[in-house]
């Protein structure tokens, strides 16, 4: 994955001692294909736990060569999360990444040329548990990060994660939808309200997927036929939510460490301003200086300048293929 970090990590900018001393337990719910690459800039600190209810895929992930790779530790568990401990039907759709505990509205998907994705190939009865119960059972009550990509069941998982949201989580990557491709699917507004009640606020889209009605082509790719170019309708995307720094207490060492973990996660996503709002708090600054000898402002400034340089390189690298395709299309 090409990012403005390039080959570097937070350790290269003076944060190595923090990453060693303050590990982060991070969850990826819907981990088909592997653990999210978002957190590679702080991988040496990350205890990575992926949830994949497809037992065959989960076994494949656990048996993959390379062990934990760049992560501090890595494991996948064959568990489906929900809002209760019960048995649910998992719908297995032709495009496996679209499989869901909810029932797809294939007619609606067909308006955007995606009906073949949602052909039902079968069902599977799976036990579900809540995120809070799983935290007790699998030992991640200290989870700092939560990625949710579960095809419409995101809100019910959040409803089963009330203790985690209140006591440990500081960052979430959540898939949100603007069109109910699954029947009864909560939409962006529902998820946003649920997270705002816990002082989480949207920071930016990490992915945004507009769908056209006449073609599956997504810009900058052009469609065949008389209408090669058209903007699409926002259908789904992944939003980054961070806990408001002002809502996090600083009256104990554990509280200050939680704040520092929140800042590290913000840095991994390039949110330097948000991280500095944490690093500049007197108790945080005092711990960084006395315990780690870290000038957080200087380290963050060096990181920001590196991201500025590399972001221009990444943007140029992405633009060149687009220009070549445009030129080829005019011949």
Image: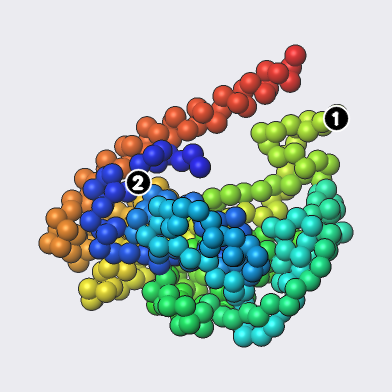
Horizontally, residue 67 falls left or right of residue 208, namely left
Q: Nearer the viewer, mark 1 or mark 2?
A: 2
Total numbered labels placed on residues in the image: 2
Instruction: For marks 1 and 2, give the CA distance.
Output: 44 Å
Residue 156 lies, with reference to residue 75, above or below; the image says below
Kindly give the residue lying farthest to the bottom in the view shown: 85
Locate residue 188: give its quadrant.
bottom right
Query: Residue placed at 53% from the left, 63% from the top?
Result: 62
- Say which residue label 1 marks: 225
Residue 130 visible to the viewer = yes
Residue sitting nearer the eye, 78 or 178: 78
Q: Position of residue 277 (x, y in %)?
A: 30, 57
Residue 16 lies, with reference to residue 198, above or below; the image says above
Q: Position of residue 97 (x, y in %)?
A: 69, 57
Query: Residue placed at 18% from the left, 51% from the top?
Result: 295
- Element under label 1? loop
Q: Which mark is residue 47?
A: none
- Say which residue label 2 marks: 9
Query: Residue placed at 84% from the left, 59% from the top?
Result: 119
Horizontally, residue 203 falls left or right of residue 11, namely right
Q: Position of residue 105 (x, y in %)?
A: 82, 63
Residue 239 lies, with reference to residue 132, above or below; the image says above
Query: Residue placed at 59% from the left, 71% from the top?
Result: 78
Q: Are marks 1 and 2 in contact (CB under 8 Å)?
A: no
């Amino acid at each position: 994955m090409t990012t403005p970090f390039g080959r570097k990590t937070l350790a290269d900018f003076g944060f190595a001692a923090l990453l060693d001393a303050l590990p982060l337990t991070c969850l990826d719910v819907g981990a088909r294909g592997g653990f999210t690459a978002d957190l590679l800039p702080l991988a040496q600190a990350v205890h990575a736990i992926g949830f994949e209810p497809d037992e065959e895929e989960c076994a494949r992930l656990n048996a993959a060569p390379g062990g934990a790779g760049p992560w501090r530790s890595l494991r996948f568990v064959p568990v489906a999360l929900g809002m209760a401990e019960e048995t649910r039907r998992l719908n297995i759709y032709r495009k496996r990444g679209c499989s869901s505990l909810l029932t797809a509205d294939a007619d609606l998907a067909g308006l955007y040329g995606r009906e073949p994705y949602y052909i039902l190939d079968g069902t599977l009865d799976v036990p579900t548990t809540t995120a809070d119960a799983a935290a007790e059972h699998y030992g991640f009550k200290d989870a700092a990060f939560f990625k949710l990509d579960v095809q419409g069941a995101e809100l019910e998982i959040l409803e089963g994660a009330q203790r985690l949201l209140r006591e440990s989580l500081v960052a979430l990557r959540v898939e949100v939808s603007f069109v109910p491709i699954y029947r009864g699917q909560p939409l962006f507004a529902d998820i946003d309200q649920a997270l705002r009640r816990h002082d989480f606020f949207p920071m930016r889209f990490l992915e945004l997927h507009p769908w056209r009605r006449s073609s599956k082509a997504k810009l900058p790719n052009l469609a065949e036929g008389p209408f090669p170019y058209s903007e699409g309708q926002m259908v789904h995307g992944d939003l980054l939510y961070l806990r408001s720094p002002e809502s996090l207490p600083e009256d104990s060492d554990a509280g200050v460490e939680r704040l520092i973990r929140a800042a590290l996660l913000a840095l991994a996503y390039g949110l330097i301003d948000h991280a500095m709002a944490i690093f500049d708090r007197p108790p945080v600054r005092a711990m960084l200086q006395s315990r780690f000898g870290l000038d957080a402002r200087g380290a963050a400034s060096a990181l920001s300048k590196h991201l500025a340089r590399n972001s221009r390189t990444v943007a140029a690298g992405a633009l060149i293929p687009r220009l070549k395709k445009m030129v080829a299309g005019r011949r």
